Amino acid sequence: MTNPRKYIALGTALILFLPLLAHANGKGQWVRKESSGPAPGFSLTDQDNRKVSLGEFRGKVVLLSFIYTHCEAACPLTTAKLASVHDTLRGKDLHIVSVSIDPAHDTPAVLKDYGKQFKGVDFRTWSFLTGPEDKVNDILLDYKVSPQWHGKRGPTGEVVSVSIVDHVLKTYLIDRKGTKRVEYWGQDFDPKVVVKDLTKVLDEKRDG
């Protein structure tokens, strides 16, 4: 059984030793850039086996991230940082959505167990989503997320396993109207900057 403190401890350690990491976005460097255009819609299954669509969160500000649960470093670090943002803005019109890029492994039950590892995660305002591989692949194309896969072969050349070895960590800030506003690339983002961006968008008039 997974140690419930595993990812909390790992996230803390990774934050402390972040300068030593070099994983996401090629070199582990954080890129923040303005974005625009409608956020592509989708419908997947959450950690409680409920169908969830991105459109359901219209009227709220959304942080959309892409993770997989057996990622050893960058994904738990990103999730831990998002958890700190989530906690800072608790009670605001914010919903976090984390889409698994490895749906074959990340079932709803696995995602729920993963989410529970992070202090402060509230499943009422944070959805961990999975679904059929073809649907997930369409979403990854829409949001320009490109996992890199590595295969292992047996003694006679047959493929015995395939696993994700890397992916560009992307998080999107989407406003109440469903428009992409900011993209964050890489795991070493500053939560304070994200909170500042979110606060600005949250303070915008609903009809503005």
Image (cartoon, helix red, strand yellow):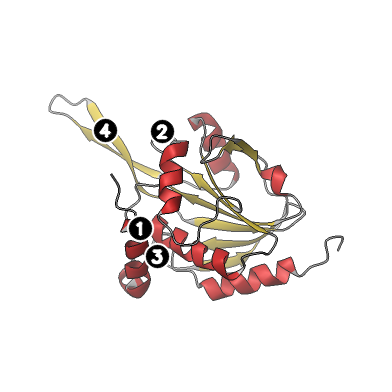
Percent position (x, y) of residue 59?
Answer: 76, 54
Percent position (x, y) of residue 185?
Answer: 51, 61
> Which quadrant holds the C terminus?
bottom right
User: For numbered disc 1, what is the local secondary structure?
Assistant: helix
Q: Amino acid at mark 4?
A: Ser
Which mark sits nearer the N-terminus, 1 or 2? 1
Can you tell which mark lies on residue 28? 3
Dots 2, 4 in contact, CB < 8 A: no
**Left or right of residue 103, residue 12 in this image:** left
Q: Amino acid at mark 3?
A: Gly
**Left or right of residue 203, residue 114 in this image:** left
User: For numbered disc 4, what is the local secondary structure?
Assistant: strand
Dots 3, 2 in contact, CB < 8 A: no
The mark lying in front, picked from 1 and 2, is: 1
Question: What residue would you read off at disc 4?
Answer: 161
Outermost residue, right side: 207
